[in-house]
Amino acid sequence: MRQRIIVLVMTVLLGVSALYAEENPRIQLKDGSIYIDGEKFFIKGIGYSPYRPGQWPGASVPPRTLEADFKRIRDAGFNTLRVWGTMPEDQLEMAEKYDLMVIQAVPLKSDVDFGYSGFIRLAESSVRQMCRIGKKHSNIIMYLMMNEPHADRLMSSGVDKTLDLYRRLASIAREEDPNRPVSMANAYWSLWLDQSMWDIVSFNTYAYAPSISGDIGYANFVKGTRSLHAQGRPFVVTEFGYSVSPDGDGGYAYGGNSQEEQADGIISCFRGLLEGGAAGGCVFEWNDEWWKAKKPERHDTHPEEWFGIVGIESKQDILGTPRKAYYALKEEFKLIVTEPREGQRIPDKALIEVNAVSQVRGVRYRIGRGKWHDLTNKGDWWRAELDASKLQAGLHTFTVMGTEDKSEITRSVNIIKCKDGHDLLPPVNIEVTVDKPRYKNGDIASITARVTNREGEPLKDYDVRLGIFNAINSHTRQWEGKTDERGYFTKRTPVAGKLDSWYYVYWAGADVEDYGYKRKDGVMGYVGADFAGGLPVKELVSVFTEDIKIDGIIDKAWLSTEIIELNIDTNFGEGTIESDSDLSAKVRVVWDKENLYLLADIKDDVPAVNRYSGNNVWNGDCVELFISVDPARIPETGYSAADFQILIGANTEMWIPGQVKGGVRNDVPKASRAIANKGKDGYILEARINIANFYDKPFIKFKKGDILGFDIAIGDADEAGTREGKIVWNGTEAGYKDSAVWGRLKLE
């Protein structure tokens, strides 16, 4: 009888506990912040993927390795683990032991058809499984539904269908565990994607990609992304970091950074996300991952394998060796000023909010060299109200100081005391707009920055940076210039793509000075584009000739035919092309009964760089010629047997790749020749391509009135020796695999 009473009492207590948990969830969201057990929580996160040399993700990791990692992570001041696959229960329990919260994730592929029924069923099942594990553990902050979905997959799957899937997954997570927020880790290429279904808005924001943060500043990159989507919800940076790989450019680029650059870059980004108003951030990542280049037994030189703040550079060093970034973050986390923010304009009163580790005591603040004032402590937070009513308007240094053992830790930010409400407005206002609410293939988009003062008056001759990024092919255009008398700076770029729809991200940035305080400022936006029947099909008229000599000289025989002008402002481009002098071209094509002749007069500030042969000729300075001898057979996707790509390198190497069978494939074109004439500011490439490459029957000849499928692309390599960008006449970057994007060549 007593045992049944105990069971009944326990059942009632568990029911009351569950009811209390539902009414008073441990994780709460309020005013753009995350609260745990009623206290504000700032995420000091580390991306954690524990797999060691020789292991693929999902492999078993010894508990002693996990425990050593978690102890080190906690000792460094991190309070959160961010994972990419569902963390199993034993690891969650060990994380609880070390008082580490977890951003739990479902391991869904990001490069699949998101509308495929099989994937949808897998996603739904995986989310249920994740949440059923997670709701047993109190140390999960939120659930991530996916990481960095690929832009082309989002759009080829159908944006509406994809969003329906995300809403469904969010609904399942809330059904299974109603007390935990849900989110998804996005990237800059999906900046345009609807985020309304998430409780917390999360983005992976790397300072080096895609040059947005270089133009507007990393803090504005974070702030701009947050302002576009968060709408009062918490905004979390779920990845930021730098690789110290042997390969890469260094200087705070994607790879090749020194340990000093990694440490400095991570601290700069951390302070930037504070300034941008994030509710926390997660450094990418804890340890080097040897599997990223698909050979887990070997530590390859690829940047993806070297992001760890703990380096694992040999199989014998399983736990790894902390890099300088580890120690820099450990010091940074001791004392964090979340309010006021760097560069903040304040009225007479402002909130002071400081996060500190438990070892730090007696936190105080002062303005300039003024008197020190104590902050009030509650948990990890120290707070007070700043009375700035007696401060003179202008720039001031706000400093906090705490004591750890016998040493003092200080942090300082710049603040601007405003003299009145009007002065609270920024002295310079930057706007960015495009000329249409949505574009279609073949349009020329105009992007306009406008700069005004706080009275709304235009600022003339103001230095402005403007940029646009195509989310489906990583093509970025950037410009610098001065505003006109109305405060405007406008640039144009062609709209071209092959998917049903896609998006452009655009931005404007400028340097701003305020009471002597200098900083970067800027804004971002995005706009959609539609296939809308495809690209307009351009037609080039080519004249007959019998007097062409392949010598790299523009002689009289070339002057009677039409010229194609290729430049980045009016033609599709990808990669990095800075100006017409970096890459542009005037191209002519003539014919006789057995040959097509090409002459490309190419502007290139680092001309005729190509060390490649065979199928790799495209990777240096190169002309890609696309020919279909039967354009009626051009498929919607792919190549027919009548479609050819001819690579002609600036080193005169030629090659026909083998996308399909028919004619000459995977070989040097027969009865053909190329000559390059290099100059100071570019080169002339002249070539003859024989009709025998396109037919197996020798009696077939070109004739007047023939219409051929035709396109041409010019690639640019520069000092690095590998392709950095290219310009296409009619099509897109897809010309090498889809002949449907080509124009036409008419033989006259």
Image (cartoon, rainbow, N blue to C red):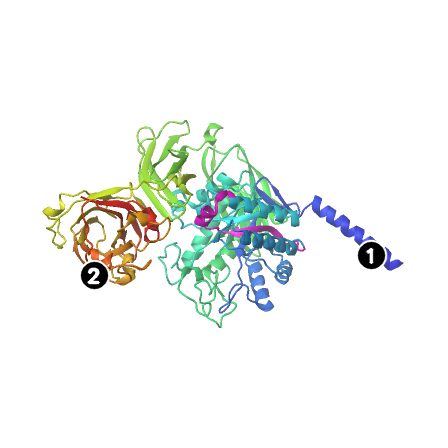
Foreground residue among 449 and 11: 11
Q: In the rendered structure, does residue 706 fall within the stretch colored magenta?
A: no
- Left or right of 135: which side holds 515? left
Q: Are marks 1 and 2 in contact (CB under 8 Å)?
A: no
Residue 5 sits in quarter: bottom right
Reading the image, the residue beneath label 1 is: 7
Q: From the top left corner, tell me how far across and down residue 74 is, in percent.
A: 58, 59
Q: Report the quarter where the C terminus lies.
A: top left
Q: From the top left corner, tell me how far across and down residue 617 is, in percent.
A: 27, 59
How many numbered badges does the structure rendering display? 2
Q: Element under label 2?
A: loop
Q: Is residue 277 visible?
A: no
Q: Element under label 1?
A: helix
Q: Which residues are magenta?
A: 136-160
Mark nearer the N terminus (1 vs 2): 1
Reading the image, the residue beneath label 2 is: 670
